[in-house]
Image: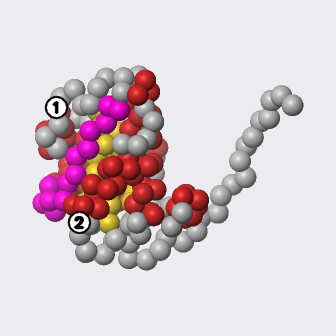
Amino acid sequence: MDLREAIYTRRAVREFTAEPVDETMLRQLIDAAIQAPSAVNQQPWSFCVVRDRALLTRISREARAHLLKGSPPVLASSARFQELLRNPDFDIFYRAPALIVISSATESPWAVENCSLAAENLMLAARAAGLGTCWIGLAQLWLATAAGKAALNLPATYLPVAPIIVGHPKSAPPPVPRKEPDIRWIGP
């Protein structure tokens, strides 16, 4: 698959087969991620790959409980999200076989941007390889806590930014219409 096709067809995937993603493929995705640009070329990212189902279940449970205690306003005002978070059977990782958490290993005013660029490279490489991905925003707040960092064996100074699930999609995600871009041309 060429780059343009990967860009135009990459969508969030939330339904996966039980087939694991092998270590070689996960390493290839991380190798694609580290090709991303970073501020001052610091390349500050760190990658934590979780394939342990018990740990994924624990993180899902802890993250849901954390959000229920103090959800951001957008989640707190959504009956749909509140219902999902209260459902003990809801797995925020959608039973994906792997989670890759991209963290900033250095303090930087551009930590989020650096890790986000790496995440997009990873997700596009996954799409090109026929895999599905989804950035799991519901995990972010808990992963940034001391308990979340401990669960991933991350140093206290690291900042988890991008929790990305990876797996073999059950089906191809449908196309999603895109709005026309809001463009302001300045100059000739």
- Residue type at mark 2 is Asp
Q: Residues within 10 Å of mark 1 (few under 14, many from 20)?
A: few
- Residue type at mark 1 is Pro
Residue that label 1 marks:
155
Q: Quick check: 157 left or right of 185?
A: left
Question: In this picture, is 7 found above or below 37?
Answer: below
Residue 64 visible? The answer is: no
Q: Position of residue 164 (x, y in %)?
A: 34, 52
Residue that label 2 marks:
22
Front residue (pair 173, 121)? 121
Q: What stretch of residues is rendered in magenta?
A: 43-55
- In contact (CB < 8 Å): disc 2 and disc 1: no
Q: Looking at the figure, which quarter contains the C terminus?
A: top right
Q: How many marks?
A: 2
Q: Residue at x 23, y 69 (%)?
A: 20
Quarter of the view holding residue 186? top right
Q: Residue at x 58, y 68 (%)?
A: 175
Question: In this picture, is 137 found above or below 98?
Answer: above
Question: In this picture, is 91 found above or below 186?
Answer: below
Question: In this picture, is 46 found above or below 40?
Answer: below
Q: Position of residue 142 (x, y in %)?
A: 26, 41
Disc 2 versus disc 1: nearer the observer: 2
Q: Residues within 10 Å of mark 2 (few under 14, many from 20)?
A: few
Q: Say which label, 2 or 1, has the lower sequence index.
A: 2
